[in-house]
Image (cartoon, rainbow, N blue to C red):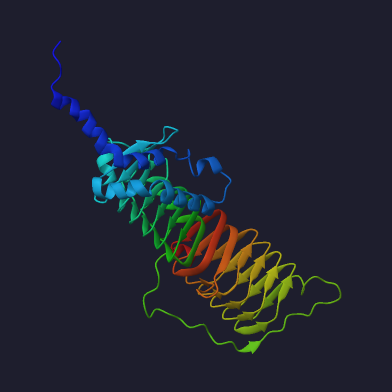
Amino acid sequence: MNDLPDGLLLIPLCIAICGLPFLPALLAARKLPRSTTGAQGTADSSAQCESFRSLVESRFASLINLARTNGTIRGTNDHGQPYIVLGFQSHLAQYLAPDSRRLRSCVIASGHLDIPGELVCDRELFAEGRINLGHHALAKAMLSHRDIAIGPRARVTHWVRSDRRLDIAEAASIKGWASAGIEVVLARRARFRKVLAPEIRFGRQREAGDTRNAPDTIGSFSPPARSGEQPGNGHHLQIPAQHTMKGDLVLSGVLTVGDGCHLIGRIRADKGIVLGQDVRVEGAIHAGGDIRIGARCSISGPVISSAGIHADPGCVFGSREDPCTVSAETILIGEASLAHGTVHALRHGEVLAERSGA
């Protein structure tokens, strides 16, 4: 038998030497846990997000640096789950099979990340740049150091976090937790569960100069005084339009507030609350029943309902300096509304088109 030429024997040795820089990063990536979300179904989504962020920083940092200079890296962890670390100029579509509609790999992008429309992503997605989730696509969880855009009718099933700006297009759906470092913008008919950001904008915002000042109040209103050991100020109560009321108010029935009123104090009504248009509330609102909020109302404190909240267009909740929580089983918010802090719909939240919220 003839011996192989000496030059051919050097080829495997050269390949092994060239692969040495990748070895520590690949070994670290193989130690990834099975999942950062699915196995913790009842865990808090914000904790899941931070766990994934730590995972990226500790286990993928070396691979990200290698991918920037050497191109995309593919591998599997110890559990056999695949991952893709995209190079800076690489596109995910290059690594998908023709007509593929499902992605089972965790994707880590050293640049921007574009998810094709109608693709189902079973695992987490991360990008140091912007993430674009295409129309009708479905993602489990997403994290970006920059902006995230969720396309029309796309869905996120667990959580999404942008360190800057999160845009949720028309009829898109966030079934879990959504958060942004600067602002979240939800288009009309977008659906949500829990949204957190310094600014949360709902639907089309009003044109510059398209403002309407609240009418001036014309008098003061004094609620009936509490008597004996009664827990509140009475059963039902109606406050006339354009009146100011100072002081806390507790009712066992329904509170109805006329247009243009200014309420200063905490409000609680066991059966429900109805606010007219252009009402200003400096304080918290709690109701055992539904809360109906008229157009262009402003509420500085928390708004909590055990049933539902329906807010007409142009409402404002909280402020940048003093964020608040809006929470109910169902939350329907009209366009041109703005919230600062947290909006939490326990079952269903949706941005109503202006014609529906009028």
* Nearer to me, 153 or 72: 72
Name which quarter of the figure residue 144 lies in. bottom left
Image coordinates for residue 280, horizontal then vertical, percent? 57, 78
**Is residue 115 placed above or below 200 in the rendered structure?**
above
The answer to whether residue 87 shows anywhere in this view is no
Image coordinates for residue 84, horizontal then vertical, percent? 34, 41
Furthest-bottom residue in view? 218
Can you say which quadrant of the picture contains the N terminus? Answer: top left
**Is residue 111 placed above or below 219 in the rendered structure?**
above
* Residue at image location 19% in from the left, 25% down from the top: 9
* Nearer to me, 202 or 69: 69
Image coordinates for residue 234, horizontal then vertical, percent? 77, 73
Furthest-top residue in view? 1
Name which quarter of the figure residue 262 lies in. bottom right
**Is residue 323 placed above or below 21 in the rendered structure?**
below
The answer to whether residue 235 shows anywhere in this view is yes
* Residue at image location 80% in from the left, 70% down from the top: 231
* Residue at image location 52% in from the left, 61% down from the top: 332
Q: Is residue 96 left or right of residue 273?
A: left
**Is residue 76 placed above or below 109 in the rendered structure?**
above
* Nearer to me, 289 or 11: 11
Image coordinates for residue 267, horizontal then vertical, percent? 67, 73
